[in-house]
Image (cartoon, rainbow, N blue to C red):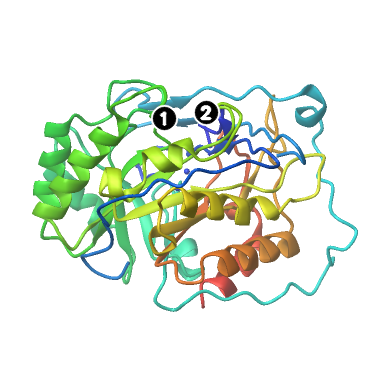
Amino acid sequence: MIGALIALALVPLAAWVQAPHSHSKARASAAAETIVTPQPTTTWGSTHGPSTRAARSEARAHTAKRTWKGTKTQRAVPSPVVKPAASSTTTRVVAASTPATAVPAVTASSARAHFTVNLKGSYSAARAAGFNVFDVAGSQNNPAGVKTKLNALPAGSKAMIWVGNLDNSSSTPGFTLAQFKAQVNALKSDPRVYGYFIADEPHPGKFPLAAAHVRERADYLRATAPAQKSFIVVLDGTSACGGTLGCEYAALAPSKTHVDLVGIDSYPCHLGAACDYSKITQRVNVAAKMGIPKSQMVPVYQAFGQEGKASGAYYGAPTASELSKMLSTWTAALPNAVLDYAYTWGTQTSAPQALVNHPALVSVVKSYNGR
């Protein structure tokens, strides 16, 4: 599920490709806001199988690129503007009350699937840590050839097919609708496909047809491969919503996009500040008020840091105890989620710190994943 983190309130997510790629998230939140709740007339959900900053004003730096083997870069999200004081520091501030040892136990439902990204073709360690959904890059030119990638998946795991950016930084989709349909047709009967990552942080304010583009893909997937899920990640944030929160949640709610699962990404740990876990609960509550059922929300949790990034570092890798607290907060907010998303397993230029080089974090995640 960073190369593309924020620029809207700022925060980033995703796909399992043969070449390194990134996911992005970023968001900004206002302290107190009046939320107007839309009244959807139709409920769309998981009808096919097991079912998703600073104190006053928050900003997230989020940069992301996705590189496809043999093709040009398909994804790039501009980096957010971050105050020098926040981005120049390369150290984390850990709250005094945070225990240095004795990580609190956190658990996830055994029925919940666990998704991560940036595996770079190596899955054994992540599978041992309890992950069972991995990102796999689709193909615009040889959709049937993606089966070869599925053959490399570990036993007991499935693929989330990445089909390129959609109304994120460009109106040109990574996959045209025809290419998307061809990919779905090629894998429609393959039980190794968990679903399709249709859009990572689309911005309907910038691209007014974003919801319609997502919806036509979700509808086609449901009609053609009803056992496979449609998934998007929504950024939202005060930058995108004119100083408040909720406009992107409202515009991209399942009643308007017909998707099965919606990722809510909130990254609470920043350089030079203690982790602010309240942002997780805040985002979940706002998303619910804007029409996204909690049963369809996917926690997108921070398992990365930008320490060591050449410039523009903003996010700090959580400690083991901080990650445990983060996961406990997500579990309390969304106890019945059917999927969660760890961003990120592998490193990338915009996220030099990740699960792969933080074994203490892997231990927390393994416990959380129920292993």
Question: Residue 367, relative to residue 237: is it above or below?
Answer: below
Q: Can residue 110 be seen here?
A: yes
Neighbours of disc 2 within 10 Å: few (<14), some (14-19), many (20+): many
Give the label on residue 203, or none: 1
Quadrant for residue 165, please give it.
Answer: top left
Give the label on residue 7, or none: none
Q: Which amino acid lies under the numbered mark 2 shown in the image of this protein?
A: Ala
Question: Residue 249, relative to residue 296: is it above or below?
Answer: above
The answer to whether 80 appears left or right of 67 in the picture is right
Q: Which amino acid lies under the numbered mark 1 shown in the image of this protein?
A: His
- Which residue, given by chain and number where applicable, does mark 2 sit on? 240
The answer to whether 196 appears left or right of 242 in the picture is left
Give the residue drawn at x 28%, y 21%.
172
Give the residue drawn at x 76%, y 24%.
83
Specify which label sits upstream in the sequence, 1 or 2: 1
Look at the numbered disc 2 and give the secondary structure of its residue. loop
263 vs 321, nearest the viewer: 263
Question: Horizontal and vertical percent for residue 198?
Answer: 30, 42
Give the residue drawn at x 27%, y 52%.
41
Question: Horizontal and vertical percent for residue 153?
Answer: 31, 60
Question: Horizontal and vertical percent for residue 14?
Answer: 42, 44
Give the residue drawn at x 11%, y 32%.
178
Image marks 1 and 2: residues in contact by CB distance under 8 Å: yes
Question: Horizontal and vertical percent for residue 246?
Answer: 50, 40
Query: What is the count of numbered marks?
Result: 2
Marks 1 and 2, how far apart at CA: 8 Å
The answer to whether 258 appears left or right of 348 in the picture is left
Q: Can residue 21 be seen here?
A: no
186 vs 256, nearest the viewer: 256
Neighbours of disc 1 within 10 Å: few (<14), some (14-19), many (20+): many
